[in-house]
Amino acid sequence: MRFLILLSVFFFSFVKANRTEQPIPEAYRIIKSITYNNINVDVVIDKPALNEVDVLLVFHGTVMYDNGIMTAANTTLDKFKGILDRKDMMIVSVAYPQENVLFGDNIVQGEAALLWVKNNANRELGIIVKKVFLGGHSQGGYMATRLNTMHQTNGVIANAPGPLNLVYRCQLEENGQIQSSADCTKLKNVYGTTTSNPNAYFKKSLLNFTNGFKSDILFVQGLNDAPIQLYSWPTFKRDVSSCTNCQNSQFVEIVGGKHVSLFESPTAKIEFNKFINSH
């Protein structure tokens, strides 16, 4: 009997000594510099106290100077977190650059962040990433929509994505009808005017990325947004709706809604959560 007791004590001591202890889940918000395929970008990570998480990767709107992109990334994270019904998702907000890059060329930082979440976050954060969703507001919606033509995820949400038509927008600036912007000025310095080289501007417009969506996508658009957005919205909606090689596209138009309708409209919030929970 004594032998059996000693043997049992030895066995359980051996098992305990050799058992892999699971880390205690920890909630945190951190800024992390990540690298994927030699592309570097900073992200803000808001993680719940779980080791297995779905991830919402979000993109901020236009920022004039790069010293403001971290503030924009944090604000965008808070905006999406504020409308998300679930408390078990990790949100990663991408502080992609804008000041010293030609419009649209920062898609490489957006892609690097997405591929890092899909392939490296498990190892570097010591977690298990399950589903991955994309979300973006304004130019961030442009980023999320373009990425949907490049990589498959579990779903994409784009609020007031744009610029939809850089030919139209930058031509208004050239004609002095609206205030000039850094984006159009940089494009003009490289490509010339919209009149002399319209194709270069169109290639970077979101109207050029209405095919080949690899995942279901939800578009939210306030119908009281700026005229420059609404001018091309019907064309964009028509082109996306007629796509023959896309996954499902859903449009939620908010009557009276402005540029930030996703974050202000109860209807948009309901559709946002319904979309995520159904995917």
Image (cartoon, rainbow, N blue to C red):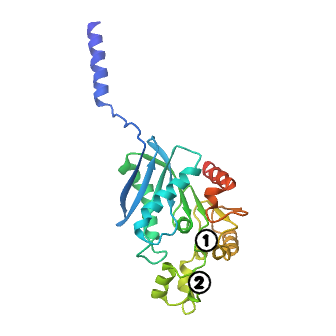
Q: Quadrant of residue 218?
A: bottom right
Q: Amino acid at mark 1?
A: Asn
- For image coordinates 47% across by 62% down, the residue present is 72
Q: Quadrant of residue 101?
A: bottom left
- For image coordinates 26% across by 10% down, the residue present is 3
Q: x, y (%) of residue 226?
A: 64, 72
| Crowd rating for badge 2 (residues with CA inside 10 Å; few <14, some 14–19, many 20+) | many
Q: Quadrant of the N terminus?
A: top left
Q: Amino acid at mark 2?
A: Val
- Residue under label 1: 211
As drawn, 6 above or below 254: above
| Crowd rating for badge 1 (residues with CA inside 10 Å; few <14, some 14–19, many 20+) | some
- For image coordinates 29% across by 11% down, the residue present is 5
Instruction: Please tell me which of labels 2 and 1 falls first in the chain.
Output: 2
Q: x, y (%) of residue 37?
A: 37, 65
- Left or right of 23 on screen, residue 219: right
As drawn, 222 above or below 209: above
- Residue under label 2: 167
Secondary structure state at the residue bearing disc 1: loop
Distance of label 2 from label 1 (alpha carbons): 19 Å
Q: Mark 2 against mark 1, which lies toward the viewer?
A: 2
